[in-house]
Image: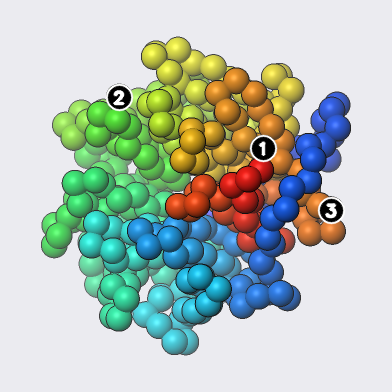
């Protein structure tokens, strides 16, 4: 099932990236591009990135995990660490500074569970030694209260708080489906949960909002959500909820109970919106077929030089560091850093 989703995402990214905007590309700014060739990055397929509390960059690839501290690289893989798989799909830091690593790939041998690294020791959780329902992890989110929330591909939503495990699935909650693809907390402490339909074209999926006791579910039939296949959720500095979905008019903004839709119909070639983040001055960034920035009134496509980046590749993850620079994961061209002096 995960393999079918990966193939579908790549196909859609390629189709949309073949379209060109009517305006000239934005001016190319200075930036960095880390690849297998010019750095210690273990693979050019970069799936996830985390900027930790000390501004270190943790980079999840299809062939292991890298930590970039200042200019020094440290590589972790199944041969030299407790990581259960080299396919690093999700990363998060908890309140104690531990790094959580979720694995999940297109094949069963790439989906080997969850690891926690305290800087010295590793703890590994899987469906055999813990209450983890499946080994494929799609997303991770730290609860400000101290818990860790884990979105799985087929096993529902998991909350780990100390030694206590709680599983939310379609049998015991109003979770839209058991394929949990995106997580974020709003300013009131509610957890926004993005899910993917069980199969392409069905009516499952959508967004579930959990307030600690009850659920509110948004789908295309009861809201302005453009698709029930949700890949990213982000609550920006103002409290607006941005929801990235699978299709061309697939970016939704929910603010003050009002929905706005962005995509091809509004002149934006976003493609599949895989990730969203806000920088320190309130710009919202979007990773899809292209990289976009929204400053609250104007959209800017961030042009990358063709010698570094193939537009058919697409972007997969985003993170903002303490300097305000944006770190961007690509499907096949490594890791990009967009500096904070870009307009």
Residue that numbered label 1 is attached to: 343
**Residue 182: quarter of image:** top left
* Mark 1 or mark 2, earlier in chain: 2
Q: In the image as oriented, which residue stretches furthest toward the bottom?
A: 79
Q: Nearer the viewer, residue 199 or 141?
A: 141
* Mark 3 or mark 1, earlier in chain: 3
Residue drawn where x is 48% and y is 71% of the image: 69
Is any part of residue 222 visible from this angle? no
User: Disc 1 on helix, strand or loop?
Assistant: loop
Is any part of residue 76 visible from this angle? yes
Residue 331 % position (x, y) = 66, 57
Q: In the image as oriented, which residue stretches furthest toward the front?
A: 341
Residue 328 % position (x, y) = 60, 53
Residue that numbered label 3 is attached to: 306
**Residue 264: quarter of image:** top right
Residue that numbered label 2 is attached to: 216
Question: Residue 163: which disc?
Answer: none
Mark 2 crowdedness (10 Å alpha carbons): few <14, some 14-19, many ≥20: few
Disc 3 from disc 1: Cα separation: 20 Å
> Which callout, 2 or 3, points to the residue nearer the camera?
3
Residue 160 % position (x, y) = 21, 55
């Amino acid at each position: 099932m995960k393999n079918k989703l990966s193939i579908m995402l790549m196909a859609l990214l390629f189709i949309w990236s073949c379209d060109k905007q009517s305006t000239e590309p934005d001016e190319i700014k200075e930036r960095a591009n880390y690849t297998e060739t010019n750095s210690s990055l273990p693979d050019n397929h970069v799936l996830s990135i985390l900027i930790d509390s000390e501004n270190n960059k943790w980079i999840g690839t299809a062939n292991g995990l890298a930590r970039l501290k200042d200019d020094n690289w440290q590589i972790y893989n199944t041969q030299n660490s407790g990581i259960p798989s080299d396919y690093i799909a999700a990363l998060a830091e908890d309140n104690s500074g531990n790094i959580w690593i979720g694995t999940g790939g297109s094949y069963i041998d790439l989906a080997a569970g969850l690891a926690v690294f305290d800087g010295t020791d590793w703890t590994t959780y899987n469906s055999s030694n813990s209450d983890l329902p499946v080994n494929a992890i799609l997303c991770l989110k730290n609860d400000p209260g101290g818990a860790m929330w884990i979105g799985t591909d087929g096993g529902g939503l998991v909350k780990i708080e100390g030694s206590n495990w709680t599983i939310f699935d379609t049998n015991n909650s109003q979770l839209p489906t058991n394929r949990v693809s995106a997580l974020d907390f709003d300013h009131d402490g509610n957890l926004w949960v993005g899910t993917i339909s069980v199969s392409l074209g069905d009516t499952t999926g959508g967004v579930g909002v959990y307030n600690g006791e009850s659920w509110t579910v948004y789908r295309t039939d009861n809201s302005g959500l453009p698709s029930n296949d949700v890949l990213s959720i982000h609550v920006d500095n103002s409290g607006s909820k941005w929801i990235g979905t699978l299709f061309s008019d697939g970016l939704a903004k929910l603010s003050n109970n009002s929905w706005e839709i962005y995509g091809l119909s509004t002149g934006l070639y976003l493609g599949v919106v895989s990730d969203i983040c806000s920088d320190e001055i309130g710009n919202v960034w979007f990773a899809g077929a292209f990289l976009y920035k929204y400053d609250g009134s104007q959209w800017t496509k961030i042009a990358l030089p063709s010698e570094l980046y193939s537009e058919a590749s697409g972007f997969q993850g985003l993170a903002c560091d303490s300097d305000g620079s944006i770190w961007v994961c690509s499907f096949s061209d490594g890791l990009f850093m967009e500096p904070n002096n870009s307009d």
